[in-house]
Image (cartoon, rainbow, N blue to C red):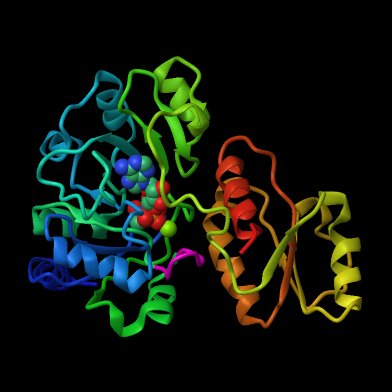
Amino acid sequence: MTSSDIVKAAGVLRAGGLVALPTETVYGLGANAEDPAAVARVFQVKGRPPTHPLIIHISGAERLGDWVADVPATARLLAERFWPGPLTLVLRRGHRVPLEATGGLETVAVRVPDHPVALALLSEFGGAVAAPSANRFGSVSPTTADHVRAELGDAVDFVLDGGPCTVGVESTIVDATGEAPSILRPGGVTREDLEAVLGMPVADGSTSRVRVPGQHPSHYAPAAKVVLVEPEKIVVEAELAQDQGHRVGVFLPPTLADAPVKAHAVVALPDSMAAYARGLYGYLRELDQRGCDLIVASLPAERGLGLAIANRLRRAAGPR
Ligand code: TXA
Ligand code: MG
């Protein structure tokens, strides 16, 4: 990774190409947000339905007004407090953002990623980069450049390697179109962090007026089937399935760290939720690679980053 890589990547974006870029959450598959043909290629490479809107990445909070029709006071406050960082704001679409990028919506999702490579690219490029996570539709998001290369290969024109992502789950998406923001997708910024800054409770998206396409029950899914059980049943359920002939992978919580478990592969989960979030997608990929056909896990407590982890695990376990 050198400054000439950044210059080259910005050139690829200007020429209508696709650049995989590191962010603090997951790797993104980026295109010039103002180039409808480049944006169309993102959908095509991902195999994503064109009605699923993309997130627009910009270089700083001071540029927000260039991309949205208006900035309500609460949105301004959240942008100033959390950017750069894993928070995406849904606001009314500015005219520079083509409908191709928003899946036809009159709102647009915007964020400033907290990663030196992404920020260098955004300031060198000068515009906005539309980027979904750099994985095929429905599968596990990439948290290293190798994950991107393994999954998308030659379909990407250039991969910027910025090392492993430090947050590991996607950004928190907040509907900030009104004065009472709500969470459309839990992520790297916790509900508690948002409430502390806003001084009011923040609802989840069920109360939001905005439409949220792209929230399928099955998403973030490894090849192996994922089953969620109560924590105290993890060992029993894993061994039962293993005895039935499955190749079982287990997410073993720290409280059970010393439990001997008869399974094909075991991931010993870390103590902290931050480390769990950082590792989550890598663990799912690892168990696939080790040939597991069934993954047994349980949900963490749904507070702090546990809310985002539980959301991803539920959807990894969702009906396919
Ligand atoms: O951390 C992240 O947010 C990563 C990195 C690359 O920035 N990006 C990411 O993008 O997770 P993606 O495409 O995998 O998820 C974007 C989600 C969509 O599925 C959709 O639900 C929501 O953002 N979204 C985008 N625009 C929206 C809008 N105008 N209104 C409501 N939801 C929107
Ligand atoms: Mg995604």
Q: Which quarter shows the N terminus?
A: bottom left
Number of numbered discs on residues: 0
**Residue 236 coordinates in the image, percent (x, y):** 91, 62
Q: Which quarter shows the C terminus?
A: bottom right
Which residue is depicted at the point 28% across and 26% down?
Answer: 75
Nearer to me, 74 or 9? 74
**Residue 16 coordinates in the image, percent (x, y):** 12, 69
Q: Is residue 197 above or below residue 99?
A: above
> Image quarter for residue 66?
top left
Would residue 220 be seen by someone viewing this image from the given angle?
yes
Which residue is depicted at the point 68% across and 83% down?
Answer: 291
Residue segment shown in magenta: 135-141
Nearer to me, 289 or 216? 216
Give the left or right position of residue 237, taking residue 277 as reference: right
**Residue 89 coordinates in the image, percent (x, y):** 32, 36
Which residue is depicted at the point 40% across and 21% down?
Answer: 197
- Asked if the magenta segment contains residue 263, the reply would be no
Give the left or right position of residue 106, taking residue 315 as reference: left
Give the left or right position of residue 194, taking residue 283 as reference: left
> Image quarter for residue 284?
bottom right
